[in-house]
Image: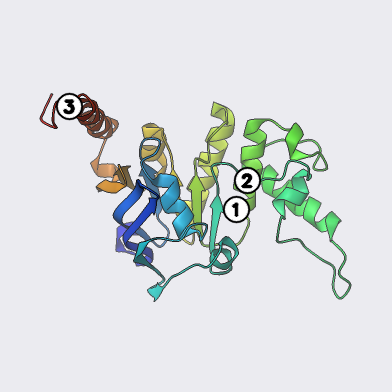
Amino acid sequence: MADQKPDVLRVEKVAKRFGPVVALREVSLNLRKGEVLGLLGDNGAGKSTLMKIICGFETPDSGQMFLRDEPYEPKSVDHARSLGIDTVYQDLALVDELSVFQNMFLRRERVHSPLPFLANRAMRAETRAALDEIGINIPSLNSPVARLSGGQRQAIAVARTVHSEADILLLDEPLAAMGAKEGSRILDLIERLKQSGEVSIIMVLHNYVHVLASCDRVNLIQDGSIVLDKPTSETSVEELTEIVVNEYRRARMAANGQGTGAA
């Protein structure tokens, strides 16, 4: 069971401000080996900021992180990647002008040795195998990604991260822009990774049903703080919805100068 396995990542009292805006308020989070952790929250709650801090894109103002029980202070995204953490960003981080296979190997290109020539044939073959594993059909791997649909672009970003040999994956809205069929294939891939027990995943999602079906545990973040941490087997769509609705009501009452009492 995931809850019997050691933590591979711990975030302790991490805070982050952007000028007057408080993005994170002493957030603490842990990820266990082989676990899929669902991170829920409304827009602006702090989910993406937390993911960017973990992957080295942003630096926290305070707090600390531990990776496999060692202090973890990523200097950059590349530094985090070198330590086994890779990310699917909400904005995908694809280069529109580059082809499908070039985006798959962006900043990690294969080269022939000893001559420094790009191994394009090998990269195309690996790209085709990665996309076939997900079940996403992209006829031409030489096409610029700017010509592809949102779902196809999302599939490339997910496939790139899954095949990066990282053992901690951060998936920020991996189903965004996907139809039901494409999304189900991504969820099937995540299930296979979970069953392997070797890859740990934090997945930002908005769909509570997807979280309960795919994740071992759920954290709900509101206004920069974790307000719920439960195994998915011990919560429900109804409980998660009630927490969010109650917070929405409190926010509306506060905005209308009615205090924070019950509605």
Q: Quadrant of residue 21?
A: top left
Q: Quadrant of residue 222?
A: top left
Q: Is residue 106 visible?
A: yes
Do callouts 1 and 2 mark residues in contact (Cβ within 8 Å)?
yes
**Residue sitting at 69 percent across and 43 percent down?**
132
Q: How is the image coloured?
A: rainbow
Q: Quadrant of residue 148?
A: top right
Q: Relative to 259, say whether 16 is above or below.
A: below
Indicate which disc residue 100 carries. none
Q: CA distance from mark 3 to mark 1?
A: 46 Å
**Nearer to me, 158 or 247:** 247
Q: Residues within 10 Å of mark 2 (few under 14, many from 20)?
A: many
In primary-sequence order, the first of circles 3 and 2 is 2
Q: Which residue is mark 3?
A: 257
Answer with left or right where residue 228 lies relative to residue 148.
left
Residue 22 in the image: state x and y as whole percent. 34, 48
Q: Quadrant of the C terminus?
A: top left
**Nearer to me, 140 or 2:** 140
Q: Relative to 96, say whether 2 is above or below.
A: below
Give the secondary structure at mark 1: helix
The label nearer to you, 3 versus 1, is: 3
Q: Relative to 232, say whether 114 is above or below.
A: below
**Residue sitting at 54 percent across and 53 percent down?**
87
Residue type (three-letter) at the residue carrying disc 3: Gly
Residue 117 in the image: state x and y as whole percent. 88, 65
Q: Which residue is mark 2?
A: 157
Q: Which residue is mark 1?
A: 161
Residue 60 in the image: state x and y as whole percent. 40, 60
